């Protein structure tokens, strides 16, 4: 995946959609949620995000929030769903500058998924985080490892070390800095 892009994948929208099917308040709450037809709205959000229309997605999410706020049923299902929708909106708002137009990328033959790499990575991380593992990773250690790996992939590791240790610069880098200053 290119530098700085956010992967708004099926999981993000699906986690909200799963709450629609959980219904723990009986038929009355389910009927009221069905009348709102949030599933259809979430499909619109997914389409908007796929095509890089973040504003359209946020508008639709805001409409869903408004519809949920208007429901008379004040049960646990509605509260969970509203919380998930608000968290999803917050995630989209925080990352809106990094959400690519997957549709355009797909049409131009560019990569749109990192799924081929995610499964093996998840297996390695899961194995290393288990308490029974002799050389297990701590959350802090795993976080630091990911920070280093990100710097390597973005060609920023050397730059970071030079900032920390100015004596690490090569003569060529020192000359360039003198010319700039």
Image (spheres, rainbow, N blue to C red):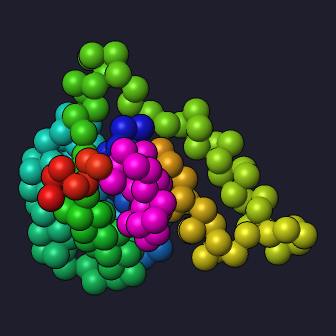
Q: Which residue shows up at 41% across the image and 38% down it?
A: 1
Residue 108 spot, x, y in % from top left: 27, 16
- Residue at left offset 16%, top offset 52%: 180
Find residue 29 and report its image quarter.
bottom left
Magenta-span inclusion, residue 163: yes
Lateral position of residue 98 relative to residue 22, left or right: left
Q: How many marks?
A: 0
Name the side, left or right, on which 102 lies relative to 145. Answer: left
Q: Mainly helix, strand or loop, the magenta region? A: helix
Residue at image x 23%, y 64%?
94
With respect to residue 149, does 30 lie above or below?
A: below
Q: Is residue 95 left or right of residue 76?
A: left
Name the residue nearer the viewer: 87 or 125: 125
Q: Residue 171 placed where, x, y %?
A: 40, 49
Residue 43 appears anywhere in the view: no
Please tell me whether residue 75 is drawn above or below residue 15 in the rendered image. below
Residue 5: in magenta span: no
Q: Quadrant of residue 93?
A: bottom left
Q: Nearer the viewer, residue 64 or 161?
A: 161
Residue 146 lies left or right of residue 123; in this view the side is: left
**Residue visible at 72% across and 59% down?**
126
Of the 4 image quadrants, the one containing the C terminus is bottom left
**What segment is highlighted magenta in the picture?**
155-174
Q: Is residue 139 visible?
A: yes
Quadrant hosting residue 106: top left
Q: Position of residue 129 (x, y in %)?
A: 74, 67
Q: Is 107 in front, or is 133?
A: 133
Give percent across and percent down for residue 130: 79, 68
């Amino acid at each position: 995946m290119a530098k700085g892009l956010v992967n708004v994948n099926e999981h993000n929208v699906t986690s909200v959609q799963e709450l629609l099917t959980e219904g723990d308040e009986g038929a009355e709450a389910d009927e009221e949620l069905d009348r709102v037809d949030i599933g259809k709205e979430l499909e619109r959000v997914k389409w908007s995000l796929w095509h890089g229309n973040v504003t359209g997605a946020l508008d639709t999410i805001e409409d869903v929030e408004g519809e949920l706020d208007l429901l008379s049923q004040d049960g646990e299902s509605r509260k969970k769903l509203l919380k998930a929708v608000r968290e999803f909106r917050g995630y989209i708002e925080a990352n809106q500058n990094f959400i690519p137009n997957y549709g355009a990328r797909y049409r131009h033959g560019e990569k749109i998924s990192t799924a081929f790499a995610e499964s093996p990575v998840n297996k390695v991380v899961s194995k290393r985080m288990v308490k029974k593992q002799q050389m297990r990773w701590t959350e802090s250690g795993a976080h630091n490892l990911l920070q280093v790996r990100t710097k390597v992939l973005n060609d920023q590791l050397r730059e970071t070390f030079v900032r920390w240790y100015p004596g690490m610069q090569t003569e060529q880098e020192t000359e360039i800095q003198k010319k700039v200053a």
